[in-house]
């Protein structure tokens, strides 16, 4: 400051900054990531708050966040988020198997909580947890406790968290559907040929119950159908799409065939 013969600092007109002499010029920087070179006279006027408000130097300083009275907080916040956005691209999608395919083995709560702990170490601002269930009764206690643990973690992390239940959903009970919807779950159900053909199946009743609640809640999404492209299913042709429409399904996914094709 002495080199520029600064006699006073006008803290009302000057935002916090750092500076360094670079030859005959001064490099000023701030916490917004902005920088500017000033000559000695401009630097002195800037610090003392006597810059001509109609001059180009004042405009440059104001646009870069050095003048607090001219600071556009939202614009600088958006700019900083854009420049630092690469920090927010860690792992975001996490698949958690609640059971094996036939439902004979269940995941423990300890594994679920460890998975959530590891997921929240990601610097991603959006996390999606896909809970995959096999056949038979849902591993309900582990699912609910794991979701509660994730919500508890997020009360501090403040991330955007999404939950998805994927797999065999025909054994879902009304109370379970109510709880899942209360926690903003999305659903991806494994559809069998009988359900697609319009037969009365447990899955058909489950999908209808979920859709009824989604309509009541004003949700704009429905159950996503996961379809195994077996010979029986493929032979349905246009009837396949008609079956999906009848069930109120808006989107479907063709799963990989058993031989990997």
Image (tube, helix red, strand yellow):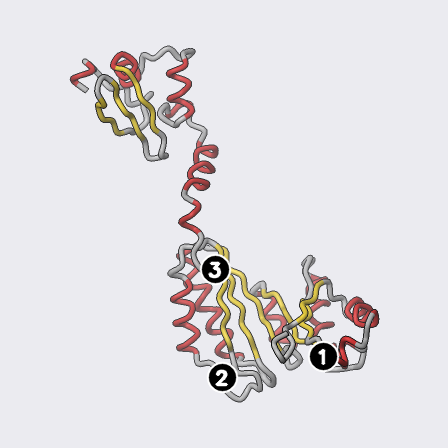
Disc 3 and disc 2 in contact, CB within 8 angstroms? no
The quadrant of the rendering that contains the C terminus is bottom right
- Within 10 Å of disc 1 (Cα), the crowding (few <14, some 14-19, many 20+) is some
Pinpoint residue 179: horizontal percent, then vertical percent. Answer: 58, 70
Residue at image position (66%, 76%) is: 190
Examine the image and state in which quarter residue 81 appears: top left
- Tell me how far mark 2 sits from mark 1, CA to CA: 28 Å
User: What kind of element bears circle 2?
Assistant: loop
Which residue is identified by label 2? 106
Is residue 172 visible to us here?
no
* Residue 261 showing in the rendered view: yes
Viewer-proximal residue, 150 or 188?
188
- State which mark lies toward you, 2 or 1: 1
Where residue 250 sits in the image (x, y, percent)?
Answer: 73, 62
Q: Earlier in the sequence, mark 1 or mark 3?
A: 3
Q: Which residue is mark 3?
A: 92
List the residue tagged with mark 1. 230
Left or right: residue 199 versus residue 2 is right
The answer to whether 7 is drawn above or below residue 218 in the figure is above
Residue 111: which numbered mark, if any? none
Label 3 residue SS: loop
**Image check: 17 left or right of 64?**
left
Which of the image's four quarters has the N terminus? top left
| Element type where label 1 sits in the image | loop
Q: Nearer the viewer, residue 36 or 64?
A: 36
Q: Residue at x 43, y 56 (%)?
A: 90
Rounded to the nearest angstrom, the CA distance separating label 3 from label 2 is 24 Å
What is the crowding at mark 2: few (fewer than 14 residues within 10 Å), some, or many (at least 20)? some
- Residue closest to the far bottom: 104
Which residue sits at x=82%, y=72%?
A: 237
């Amino acid at each position: 400051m002495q080199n520029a013969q600064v006699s006073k600092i006008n803290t009302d007109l000057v935002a916090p900054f750092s500076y360094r002499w670079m030859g005959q010029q001064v490099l000023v920087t701030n916490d917004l990531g902005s920088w500017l070179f000033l000559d000695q006279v401009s630097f002195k006027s800037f610090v003392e708050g006597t810059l001509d408000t109609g001059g180009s130097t004042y405009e440059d300083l104001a646009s870069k966040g050095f003048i607090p009275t001219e600071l556009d907080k939202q614009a600088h916040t958006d700019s900083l988020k854009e420049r630092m956005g690469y920090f927010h691209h860690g792992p975001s999608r996490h698949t958690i198997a609640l059971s094996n395919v036939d439902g004979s083995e269940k995941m423990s709560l300890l594994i679920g909580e460890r998975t959530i702990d590891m997921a929240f170490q990601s610097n991603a601002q959006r996390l999606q947890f896909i809970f995959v269930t096999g056949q038979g009764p849902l591993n309900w206690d582990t699912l609910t406790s794991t979701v509660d643990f994730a919500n508890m973690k997020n009360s501090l992390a403040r991330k955007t968290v999404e939950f998805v239940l994927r797999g065999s959903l025909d054994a879902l009970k009304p109370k379970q559907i109510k709880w899942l919807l209360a926690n903003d779950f999305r659903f991806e159900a494994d559809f069998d040929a009988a359900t697609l053909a319009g037969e009365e199946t447990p899955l058909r009743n489950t999908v209808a119950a979920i859709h009824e609640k989604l309509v009541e809640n004003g949700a704009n999404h429905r159950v996503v159908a996961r379809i195994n492209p077996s010979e029986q299913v493929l032979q349905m042709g246009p009837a396949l799409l008609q079956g999906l429409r009848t069930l109120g399904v808006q989107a479907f996914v063709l799963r990989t065939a058993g031989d990997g094709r």
